[in-house]
Amino acid sequence: MLMKRTTELMTIGETGEVGSTATVVDLFCGIGGLTHGLHLAGLNVVAGIDLDLSCRYAYEHNNGDTRFICADVLSLAPAVIAKLYPADGVRVMIGCTPCQPFSKYTKRYRKGEQNGGRENDDWQRDNKWHLVYTFSDIVEHVMPEIVSMENVPELVTEKVFSDFYYTLMRLGYNVSHSVVYCPDYGVSQNRRRLVLFSSLFGELSLIKPIYNKRNYPTVRKIIGGLPRVAAGEKNSDDKIHSASRLSPRNLLRIRSSVPGGTWHDWDDSLQLKCHKKGTGKNYTSIYGRMIWDAPSPTITTQFYGYGNGRFGHSDQDRSLTLREGALLQSFPHDYSFIDPERAINRRKVCVHIGNAVPVELGRAIGESIKIHISEVNFNGR
């Protein structure tokens, strides 16, 4: 059956645009960062699937006719996903399984930094790690010609990743993976991500870096031109260009902070009790300011709060606004996150933005797939 399917695809690429011959389904799509990047690369994403209904507005409003399917991938029959693809063309399945179980923080917590050296039971109760196996099962049932997954680099050390990798190989895919430095592809974040590709047609890898140290997009370039806002205020023309309030004490702290510095720069009277403990002295990445002429730190689901990381604005006495976080995630300025008929939930928007795959990384993934499809010599297979 697989050989027949591959034979039927041999003439693809000889006629028409690649984007019209490849159809993509995005699993765990969120608000559409990855989908939007694929669209910008010219690929046809027909559907995104995610459990969180609150992602629907942003996903569908910004991604044309692409359909948002609110469903739990754990309980969704692979046959249902298979029917989303048309009868002809190259089928591409792509997704970013929730990465919190594999993050550096979770791995520290899991190893027992807060649990006397014992494995933390919360890890065992967190079913999110199992979604990689679910992704693997769906691939095995649907057998799309191309599969890609994006996640945190720490995933490669987990058994679930090696199981996924060798399942793909057993199914006949050519599999590769790499850890990507996001500024290389136009994302202004000091962030690394794992990108896996697999193809039934042969070797598929990420395109070469587009940027380098001389021209990385910087914080200044990405958000420097936005209107100024003070802590606790919002711009009248943009609802999500709004900043969190700061307590009088935190206002003193950020005024004592320098870009790229730490809370060690503060007067002792401003330091927190935890900073003065032995275990707290190493946590220097919180309550910091970003550096203007460098990429930002990783945008997390908590970037809206000054004390949650190095999310202090470079030269304004406040934390990042929601719009600034979105721009640093490489969403276009006109990407709409809020249904105008609903009240804004800043915490929810912050989580949506922080959980998203950076759009420009998604575009690089899409360009890589598009080039691969166009270069495959189908007549020779």
Image: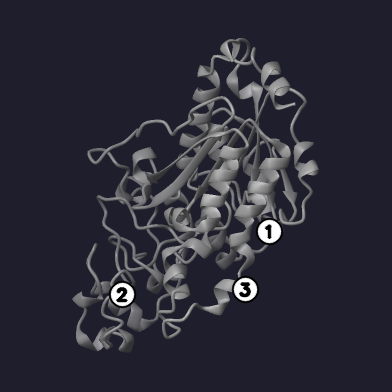
Measured as percent of width and height from the top left, residue 192 is found at 38, 50
Q: Position of residue 188 (x, y in %)?
A: 36, 47
The image quadrant where one finds the N terminus is top right
Tell me the element at label 1. loop
Residue ID at (28%, 61%): 315
Residue 114 in the image, given as x and y percentages of width and height: 43, 82
Q: Are marks 3 and 1 in contact (CB under 8 Å)?
A: no
Q: Secondary structure at mark 2?
A: loop
Instruction: Please tell me which of labels 3 and 2 falls first in the chain.
Output: 3
* Amino acid identity at mark 1: Asp
Residue at position x 56%, y 38% in the image: 169
Which of pointers 3 and 1 indicates the residue nearer the eye? 3
Crowding around mark 2 (Cα neighbors within 10 Å: few <14, some 14 to 19, many 20+) is few
Dot 3 falls on a residue whose secondary structure is helix
- What crowding class fits label 1: few (fewer than 14 Cα within 10 Å), some (14-19), or many (20 or more)? some
Separation of marks 3 and 2 at Cα, in angstroms: 27 Å
Residue 346 occupies quadrant: bottom right
Observer-nearest of 55 and 324 = 55
Instruction: Classify 57 as above or below 308.
Output: above
Q: Residue furthest front?
A: 170
The answer for how far apart the CA atoms under marks 2 and 1 are is 32 Å
Residue 329 horizontal/vertical position (percent): 45, 50
Rendered image: mark on residue 125: 3
Who's the residue at 29% across and 42% down the image? 216
Q: Earlier in the sequence, mark 2 or mark 1?
A: 1
Q: CA distance from mark 3 to mark 1?
A: 20 Å
Task: Name the residue beneath numbered marker 1.
Answer: 52
Residue that carries the numbered disc 2 in the rendered image: 283
The residue under the point 70% across, 27% down is 2
